[in-house]
Image (cartoon, coloured by chain):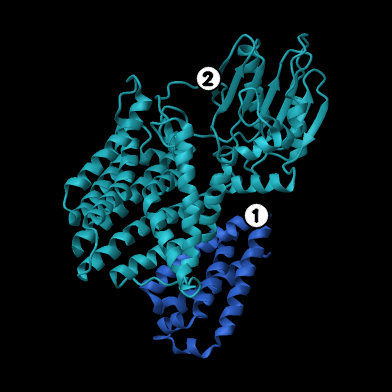
Chain colours: A cyan, B blue
């Protein structure tokens, strides 16, 4: 039994150490991604505040008329209306194929095309980096994050095995002695959020399961013309309703059925407020199909209900619910829990809190490693000093340095000139340049001072974000609160809260050292 | 309002489960020696009962999928609050524990479910 515990401890320590900094990056970007669309909104202050489309009929009417005007020659139409914080808060229209393609965002109140937003990657950039990193092909990034996630799972399981007194120590946090405090912090942050940590790691891997385990697809469905696993056939089998609308055009013109009665049908069938988007395949053709789909954020099952109508007669051809098979709904629930599209405001903040705890779990683990070895050193025993110093510097450069870089990303959004070429890319470059600067600072400064200094920088970086917002736009904190714009106000207030927390920690560190 | 009801039940239940452990009873009983007179099993049973009540309330407010997630999320937050409470102000735990149960009872009566 003791040998098992020893080997599990080694495995836990080594996987945690080697992948810890990367996992910290994944956790910070992932936690921020719970508010990805809110961050998008904040980073495009030129666009109007979010307005929920209570009655879908006028919103869809605006969208369809826009499509009829601009996409008359297209082969595929798509439109989505805003119902909640997921996706765009404006009416989205896209048309492609045939002789024209394009897209636009429309103001839900007037149908006017929205424009003038500064070029930015917004919160989506943080979300994308979360699973495929940056400055490398997406495949490579996905593999690296996947590897880190697999070892994260190993770290979780070995941590559970190693933590002998997992139930007795559930509520125990002893802030007195240094090493014990860090160990307790690491255990507590992991154990109280253990359901979340296990879920988030496993479901994250599930999202890209056909990427990480392609041979299972090949074994059942073979390969396609490019020699890649035939996931297309697999998805068609998982969603048989697709066969009723993914058909070729007939080549014969026929007038498109009136869509608005279909919208009312969907509202009646599914209840008010659930219809989310409409797709039209081959508008104006005899084989046209109109597909109405519901809001993916109804509950944790990450799947859509669909109504498929004949595009000429308006007759209902097929209806599909959220649940297919046992294995598909398991996948849909797991991925749904990971992405948390279904989470309303309270639940979303709870998820955010759990993400912060996960971030703390990784950070306290990394610090614990150095604290243990420092104490071993002070006790007079042998320790690799080069290794210890490297880890200490990498720790502060990542744990404090990376959040500073994220704050710099938001600052760059307000500071870079709106008409600067490559502006969106340069916001991201700013993030990584500042991170590199923090790493250099960590390298050059004495280890004892680095934490308090970088925490001080973090405090300033986060507190300056709402200041820049107030100075460079008309949507500062005071204006947001008086306008009831809780997306903007919430963002600014969160920046202030993080800045104050960093500042308080920095001052506390200064006092004790 | 109803969310608070579920949270109070969860927090109350978890604090009773904490008190079912001797180390936490010792921390807390310095100013409230009566804590030690109650059987540990009583704490355990009522603690789990309150967690179950919190689950039932969550499920009835938000449905199955959302309700389960809310329950776990609220218990997670409540656990952290208890950890910090026990670490920095253990003597006040009986007071806050009773307060949470009183608030729970009041909200239960007011909500009429």
Which residue is found at the position 41% from the left and 77% from the top?
A: B92
Residue A469 at x, y percent in the picture: 33, 36
Q: Let me know if residue A282 appears in the view.
A: yes
Position of A384 relative to B87 (above/below): above
Residue A130's place in the image compared with A499, above or below, is above
Q: Which mark is residue A154?
A: none
Total labels drawn: 2
- Residue tagged 1: B62
Q: Nearer the viewer, residue A485 or A455?
A: A455
Any mark on residue A113, and which?
2
Residue found at x 63% / y 74%: B49
Element carrying mark 2 = loop
Q: Is residue B84 left or right of residue B64?
A: left
Residue A417 lies in what quarter of the image?
top left
In the rendered image, the quadrant that contains the C terminus of chain B is bottom right
A211 or B35: nearer the viewer: A211
Q: Secondary structure at mark 1?
A: helix
């Amino acid at each position: 039994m003791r040998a098992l515990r020893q080997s599990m401890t080694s495995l836990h320590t080594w996987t945690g150490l080697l992948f810890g900094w990367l996992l910290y990056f994944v956790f910070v970007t992932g936690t921020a991604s719970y508010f990805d669309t809110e961050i998008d909104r904040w980073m495009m202050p030129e666009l109007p505040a979010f307005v929920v489309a209570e009655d879908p009929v006028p919103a869809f009417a605006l969208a369809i008329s826009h499509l009829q005007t601009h996409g008359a020659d297209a082969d595929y139409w798509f439109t989505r209306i805003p119902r909640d914080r997921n996706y765009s808060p404006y009416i989205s229209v896209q048309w492609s194929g045939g002789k024209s393609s394009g897209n636009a965002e429309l103001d839900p109140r007037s149908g006017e095309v929205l424009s003038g937003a500064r070029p930015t990657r917004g919160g989506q950039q943080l979300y994308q980096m979360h699973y495929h990193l940056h400055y490398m092909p997406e495949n490579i990034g996905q593999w690296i994050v996947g590897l880190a996630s697999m070892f994260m799972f190993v770290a979780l399981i070995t941590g559970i095995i190693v933590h002998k007194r997992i139930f007795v120590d559930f509520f125990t946090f002893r802030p007195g002695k240094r090493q014990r405090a860090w160990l307790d912090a690491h255990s507590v942050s992991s154990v109280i959020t253990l359901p979340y940590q296990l879920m988030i790691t496993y479901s994250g891997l599930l999202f890209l399961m056909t990427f990480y385990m392609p041979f299972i697809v090949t074994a059942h469905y073979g390969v396609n013309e490019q020699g890649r696993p035939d996931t297309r056939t697999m998805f068609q089998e998982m969603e048989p309703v697709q066969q009723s609308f993914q058909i070729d055009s007939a080549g014969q013109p026929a007038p498109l059925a009136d869509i608005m009665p279909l919208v009312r049908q969907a509202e009646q069938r599914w209840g008010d407020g659930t219809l989310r988007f409409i797709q039209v395949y081959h508008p104006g053709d005899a084989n046209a199909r109109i597909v109405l789909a519901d809001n993916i954020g109804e509950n944790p099952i990450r799947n859509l209900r669909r109504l498929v109508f004949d595009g000429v007669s308006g007759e209902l051809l097929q209806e599909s619910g959220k649940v297919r098979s046992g294995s598909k709904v398991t996948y849909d629930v797991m991925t749904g829990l990971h992405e948390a599209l279904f989470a309303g405001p309270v639940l979303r903040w709870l998820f955010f809190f759990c993400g912060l705890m996960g971030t703390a779990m990784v950070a306290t683990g990394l610090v614990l490693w150095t604290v243990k070895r420092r104490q071993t050193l002070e006790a007079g025993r042998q320790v690799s000093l080069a290794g210890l110093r490297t880890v200490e510097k990498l720790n502060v450069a990542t744990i404090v340095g990376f959040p500073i870089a994220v704050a710099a990303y938001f600052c760059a959004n307000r500071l870079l000139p709106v008409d600067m070429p490559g502006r969106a890319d340069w916001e991201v470059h700013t993030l990584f340049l500042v991170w590199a600067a923090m790493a250099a600072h960590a390298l050059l400064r004495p280890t004892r001072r680095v934490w308090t200094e970088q925490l001080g920088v973090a405090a300033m970086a986060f507190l300056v974000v709402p200041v820049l917002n107030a100075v460079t736009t008309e949507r500062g904190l005071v204006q947001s609160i008086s306008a009831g714009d809780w997306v903007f106000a919430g963002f600014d207030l969160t920046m202030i809260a993080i800045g104050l927390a960093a500042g308080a920690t920095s001052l506390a560190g200064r006092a004790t050292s | 309002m109803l969310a608070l009801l579920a949270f109070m039940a969860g927090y109350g239940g978890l604090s009773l489960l904490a008190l079912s452990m001797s180390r936490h009873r010792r921390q807390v009983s310095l100013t409230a020696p009566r804590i030690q007179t109650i059987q540990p099993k009583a704490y355990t049973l009522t603690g789990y009962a309150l967690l179950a009540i919190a689950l039932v309330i969550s499920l009835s407010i938000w449905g199955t999928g959302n309700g389960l997630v809310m329950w776990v999320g609220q218990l997670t937050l409540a656990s952290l609050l208890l950890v910090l409470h026990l670490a920095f102000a253990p003597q006040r735990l009986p007071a806050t524990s009773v307060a949470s149960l009183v608030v729970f009872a009041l909200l239960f009566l007011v909500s009429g479910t």
